[in-house]
Image: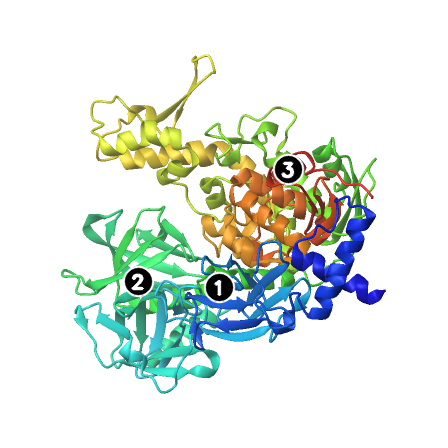
């Protein structure tokens, strides 16, 4: 009986007899059973062990190459078996040691009768390393499956290859070798193979130019290969102190971070710089002469003093030789850039230009230029963990946050809140919490709802609170441009029931998100908001200027700012004032942008100053109290010296993650479970539907599955747990999700149209609320 049952199943698969949903009479069933039994005895059925796989390439192959292999299908008796789409064939290719699933193209049969039993499979591997190719019929592997193939990385790509622990200024000691390590990567970001016998100078070019003379400096470097770490080292050794510019290229194309400055110090100056950085008292100053301000030469070089501390670089002059006057202060952060020029013709001293992109550019001459720049650079590297790349700064930031709060335990703390009054109830529930309590692991209960918080409820609470705080409809923040793509900014005209304490609470929530993220990917929380660049700049202490209007208030930028920049303003009757109007167009007030602004007319010589003053008023001065209270709450958990190691774009990435979704990234970083043959059809439909999603629909899918609509900074790769797709073992129902495990459960459907309709309905109507099933 068992033999007959087995033969019926095999025959049903091999002859195309329907397995369900078909009514047959008893005589037909008996005839089919007899035929199947005879076929089984004669070996006339598809046999996985008799199928053959032929690979149409030699090994190893290079990533990025489309490769082909063929599967020939045979019956148990050795006869060719004509393959068709009703047969349960499954081809699965896992690259990168089995971590990444590769999409395959499978063509069954051929017009040529001799190839009717052949399937042609093509795929492209982008991850170097071992690749596992599995060919299954139903759940049985064909002969030899799974197969192990090897794919090698491609040649280095200049856009992906760069120096690790990068810094825009490299400090060296005269006549002392200095190693800069480089990690070659191909266009798919695979580490390239470093051959110890190959000479890197065959592919890499290094140009070093002395700034003072503009002369190239040959033979000041050599290469070292480190195959065990897949790295090569550029070893610099310069025998003359001074400043140099370096450019490193691969086959004529400059590397991603291949342009940098080299500051070469003699041994005594190098020891002085190290002493400066190690000092506990930071009263370090050097004399210089100011020769240009805001790109305009000063009539006479002005004697100034440059003060350097771990937080800032300040330029002062002394009135009557005893009264100090601060001219400008630059924050000690990566956005403050140095530019080195040759010796000034008048003073005969080396020139140093300092610019942070928002304050007036300063140009000075000083004999101690190298010491000033080297001290600044060493302080900067110490503050940001030794590298200027975002990834390295992020790791340093998380490490320092954990270190700062290491005495605060991450114990559970229950919070009971109301969903329909999420902000008021959350403020009330956290009103008495101190810093130690804010460092605890919140366990959320929504009053009146069933649900156990294993992480999903906490993530949803963060999402709802951020929406209540930062959604412009709630008026604590507002958009300059009234559309969903506009950036949010503190609202100086908020309703009376929204107090400054709400900004302080908003700062605490953002600080809590950053603290949770520092604890590891399983706790990572993102801020659901798209903040204006000028607001982010103020959080890290940068001065606001008119260029922020282009992103923050694009309508004003196009209608006014750009027009003033590109046209003559002499006849515009503009003054250093800002007029505010009511919604009906009535003049409400006129405010001076600078002291006595109503008497100072705007002309072509001062229009940039006017635009900066306008930006300062509209984007900063009008919301000064709101920003101060936000920072008060934020700094309770995150100190400002850690925030300022990022620029405003990096700060948004740190707090809010990415708002753009890559389907390729999604496909590369997800997991699948369930009976693969049943899931294959629905999974194909899923990727087709997702490929057509808007950003809002992708955000809703993420919110439905993970509890948060935005991704971590590293995209889908940093979701923990991974985005997990599984079968739901139901038919025609709506998809369901388990946000605590980032799991999406997909039922079966009759057609793609039914599937897409159900998925869209689920993510749009079912993305909030928890219940027990």
* Viewer-nearest residue: 347 or 753: 753
* Residue drawn 48% across the image and 31% down it: 622
Residue topped by disc 2: 287
Up/down of 536 relative to 668, above or below: above
Residue 408 sits in quarter: bottom right
Of tags 2 and 1, which is closer to the observer? 1
| Identity of the residue furthest to the left in this view | 345
Describe residue 331's horizontal placement relative to residue 456 as left or right: left
* Viewer-nearest residue: 318 or 558: 558
Question: CA–CA distance between discs 2 and 1?
Answer: 85 Å
Residue topped by disc 1: 115
Q: Judge the density around disc 1: few (<14), some (14-19), many (≥20) Cα neighbours within 10 Å.
A: some
Residue 748 x/y as whole percent? 69, 45
| Element type at mark 2 | strand
Residue topped by disc 3: 754
* Viewer-nearest residue: 443 or 65: 65
| Element type at mark 3 | helix
Residue 218 x/y as whole percent? 21, 78
| Element type at mark 1 | helix
Of tags 3 and 1, which is closer to the observer? 1
* Residue drawn 39% across the image and 86% down it: 196
Q: Which quarter of the image is occupied by the N terminus?
A: bottom right
Q: Which quarter of the image is occupied by the C terminus?
A: top right
Say whether disc 2 or disc 1 marks the residue closer to the N-terminus. Answer: 1
Question: CA–CA distance between discs 3 and 2?
Answer: 75 Å
* Residue drawn 26% across the image and 57% down it: 364
Describe residue 471's horizontal placement relative to residue 409 as left or right: left
Q: Are marks 3 and 2 in contact (CB under 8 Å)?
A: no
Question: CA–CA distance between discs 3 and 1?
Answer: 36 Å
């Amino acid at each position: 009986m068992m033999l007959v049952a087995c033969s019926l199943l095999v025959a049903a698969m091999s002859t195309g007899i329907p397995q369900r949903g078909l009514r047959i009479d008893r005589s037909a069933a008996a005839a089919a059973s007899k035929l199947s039994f005879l076929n089984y005895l004669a070996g006339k059925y598809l046999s996985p062990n008799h199928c053959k796989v032929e690979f149409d390439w030699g090994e190893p192959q290079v990533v990025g190459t489309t490769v082909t292999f063929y599967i020939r299908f045979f019956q148990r008796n050795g006869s060719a078996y004509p393959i068709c789409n009703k047969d349960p064939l499954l081809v699965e290719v896992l690259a990168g040691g089995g971590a990444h699933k590769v999409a395959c193209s499978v063509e069954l049969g051929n017009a040529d009768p001799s190839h009717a039993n052949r399937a042609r499979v093509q795929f492209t591997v982008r991850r170097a390393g071992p690749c596992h190719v599995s060919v299954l019929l139903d759940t049985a592997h064909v002969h030899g499956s799974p197969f192990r193939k090897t794919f090698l990385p491609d040649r280095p790509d200049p856009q992906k290859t760069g120096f690790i622990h990068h810094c825009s200024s490299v400090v060296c000691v005269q006549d002392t070798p200095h190693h800069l390590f480089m990690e070659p990567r191909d266009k798919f970001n695979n580490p390239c193979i470093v051959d110890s016998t190959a000479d890197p100078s065959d592919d890499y070019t290094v140009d070093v130019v002395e700034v003072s003379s503009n002369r190239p400096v040959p033979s000041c470097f050599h290469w070292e290969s480190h195959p065990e770490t897949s790295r090569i080292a550029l070893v610099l050794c310069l025998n003359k102190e001074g400043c140099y510019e370096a450019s490193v290229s691969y086959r004529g194309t400059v590397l991603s971070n291949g342009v940098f400055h080299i500051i070469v110090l003699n041994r005594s100056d190098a020891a002085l710089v190290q002493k400066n950085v190690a000092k506990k008292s930071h009263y370090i100053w050097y004399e210089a002469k100011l020769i240009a301000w805001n790109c305009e030469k000063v009539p006479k070089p002005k004697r100034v003093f440059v003060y350097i501390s771990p937080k800032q670089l300040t330029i002062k002059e002394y009135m009557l030789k005893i009264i100090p006057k601060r001219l400008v202060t630059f924050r000690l952060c990566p956005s403050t850039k140095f530019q080195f020029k040759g010796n000034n013709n008048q003073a005969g001293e080396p020139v140093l230009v300092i610019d942070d992109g928002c304050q007036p550019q300063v140009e000075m001459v000083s004999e101690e230029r190298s010491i000033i720049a080297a001290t600044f650079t060493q302080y900067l590297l110490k503050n940001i963990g030794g590298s200027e790349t975002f990834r390295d700064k992020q790791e340093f930031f998380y490490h320092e946050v954990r270190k700062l709060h290491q005495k605060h335990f991450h114990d559970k703390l229950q919070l009971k809140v109301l969903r329909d009054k999420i902000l008021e109830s959350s403020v009330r529930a956290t009103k008495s919490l101190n810093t130690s309590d804010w460092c605890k692991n919140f366990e959320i209960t929504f009053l009146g709802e069933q649900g156990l918080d294993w992480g999903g409820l906490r993530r949803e609470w963060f999402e709802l609170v951020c929406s209540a705080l930062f959604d412009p409809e709630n008026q604590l923040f507002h958009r300059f441009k009234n559309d969903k793509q506009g950036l949010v900014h503190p609202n100086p005209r908020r309703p009376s029931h929204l107090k400054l304490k709400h900004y302080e609470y908003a700062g605490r929530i953002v600080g809590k998100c950053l603290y949770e993220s520092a604890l590891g990917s399983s706790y990572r929380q993102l801020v659901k908001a798209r903040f204006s660049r000028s607001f982010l700049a103020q959080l890290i202490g940068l001065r606001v200027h008119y260029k922020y209007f282009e992103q923050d208030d694009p309508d004003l930028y196009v209608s006014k700012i750009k027009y003033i920049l590109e046209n003559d303003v002499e006849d515009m009757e503009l003054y250093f004032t800002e007029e505010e109007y009511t919604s009906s167009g009535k003049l409400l007030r006129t405010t001076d942008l600078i002291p006595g602004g109503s008497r100072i007319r705007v002309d072509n010589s001062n229009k940039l100053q006017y635009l900066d003053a306008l930006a300062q008023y509209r984007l900063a001065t009008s919301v000064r109290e709101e920003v101060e209270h936000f920072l008060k709450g934020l700094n309770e958990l995150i100190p400002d010296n850690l925030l300022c190691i990022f620029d405003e774009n990096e700060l948004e990435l740190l707090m809010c993650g990415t708002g753009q979704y890559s389907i390729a990234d999604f496909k590369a970083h997800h997991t699948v479970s369930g009976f693969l043959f049943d899931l294959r059809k629905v999974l194909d439909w899923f990727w087709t539907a997702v490929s057509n999603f808007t950003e809002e629909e992708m955000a809703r899918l993420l919110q439905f599955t993970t509890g948060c609509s935005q991704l971590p900074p590293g995209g889908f790769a940093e979701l923990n747990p991974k985005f997990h797709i599984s079968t739901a073992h139901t038919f025609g129902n709506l998809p369901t999700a388990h946000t605590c495990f980032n799991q999406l459960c997909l039922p079966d459907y009759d057609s793609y149209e039914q599937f897409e309709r159900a998925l869209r309905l689920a993510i749009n109507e079912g993305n909030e609320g928890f219940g027990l099933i």
